[in-house]
Amino acid sequence: MSSNYDNDQSTSALTELQDSGLVDGAFLSALDRERGDTLSVIVDPETSLVDQIPSGSDVVWIQGGGDFSLDGLSRSVIRDINALVFSTQTNVTLDLSSLFRGSVIFGAGDDFLTYSGRIAQNVQGGDGNDSVIGGTGNDTVKGGAGEDSVVSGKGKDIIDAGDGDDTVDSGTGNDSILCGAGNDSITAGTGNDTIVTGLGDDTVVAGTGKDSILGSSGNDYLDGGSGNDKITGGGGNDVLIGGDGNDSITSGTGNDTIFGGAGKDTITVGDGSDIVDAGTGNDKIVVQSSEINDDSTTITIDGGAGRDVLDLFGVHITSGSVDTAANTATVVLADGTTLDISNVERFIGNFDSDAHAENISLTGLGNFLDSL
């Protein structure tokens, strides 16, 4: 066993890990500092007895796959370990002790990690299809390039899903989740979560917290859940759902479909041919001017059952008409955009004061207008 405990070998393994590109330079530097002058060990579970890892082993390099557990080690030995590094391309199943408080770095295999403790963990996945089940601490998980599955616990977790088609189920803490280039599926818990989608077509379903969801270039499905959420679409053709809270929803540059839900929502549109169903609350819909719209752009707005306001301060109107019996209106903007409007009780805007006032013909708007 003593031949396996070699600081020179761990130096070579550190160099190999650096060359692999699995972890960033800052993490490697911290790991090297942790290694310091104390003992680093090389362990192969198939040839070495894991329970004979000596006290003071701050970095443990595991070569070879299979099952690996810290069971059988003393409390002091487990607490001395700052990092477990799996420098292998084989599959690993790791069951962490609740006493472990270091970092875990996986290789290129399909790895499986479970942890039920309260101490924060730092987990770096490799290129394989990894599965991580976290504990109740404030964990940091980087999924890597594979199709990963991450289930976090009650802590305030940071999850970087990586570039594969990943699945993330966050727990009850206030989590931060970053998607990569794959088509990811994110289910947020009851905390106040921050979620940023990636380059793929992502699906995000948030929980009851006050969440912030930011779309990217993919065709995303973003559901804020029942909290007072902030949802912003990206460059794709997104579906944005506010849920039951008082939400702030902003469309992106694609052709988005927006459902406000039951709360008192603020919905902002303007870039793309968007469809808006504001829902049952007393909502405010804001139309902003766009430099990318053309004559083919149509924004469809249905205010829903509440007493809703359409804010046109940010646009220039060339013409408009209202059918009071049907509670509908059509407005044409200076940039060529057409607004098809229904179930909106109040309009606000600079209808008599802007530079384009002489071109405005708002036939039949009557009491619908409230110039402020």
Image: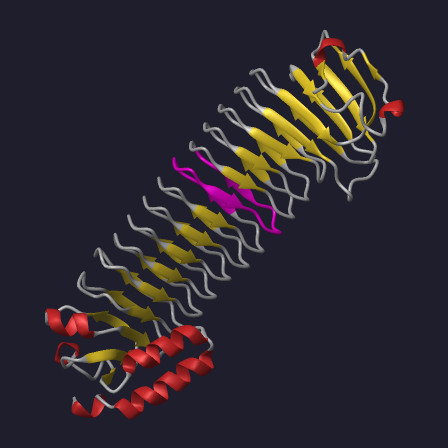
Q: Is residue 181 above or below residue 350?
A: below
Q: Position of residue 79 (x, y in %)?
A: 17, 70
Q: Is 217 placed left or right of 1 in the picture?
A: right
Q: Quadrant of residue 348?
A: top right
Q: Quadrant of the N terminus?
A: bottom left
Q: Is residue 61 above or below residue 301?
A: below
Q: Quadrant of the C terminus?
A: top right
Q: Is 323 placed left or right of 86 in the picture?
A: right
Q: Quadrant of residue 85?
A: bottom left
Whether residue 89 is visible to the viewer of this picture, yes or no, is: no
Q: Position of residue 10 (x, y in %)?
A: 30, 86
Q: Is 208 placed left or right of 65 in the picture?
A: right
Query: Residue 205: within the magenta?
Result: yes
Residue 191 versus residue 51: which sits nearer the camera? 191
Q: Position of residue 219 (x, y in %)?
A: 61, 46
Q: Position of residue 158 (x, y in %)?
A: 39, 56
Whether residue 325 is visible to the viewer of this picture, yes or no, is: yes
Point out the stretch of residues depicted in magenta: 203-225
Residue drawn at 69 percent across, 19 percent down:
347
Q: Is residue 34 above or below residue 75?
A: below
Residue 173 versus residue 107: which sits nearer the camera? 173
Residue drawn at 36 percent across, 89 percent down:
12
Residue drawn at 45 percent across, 73 percent down:
24
Query: Residue 189: within the magenta?
Result: no
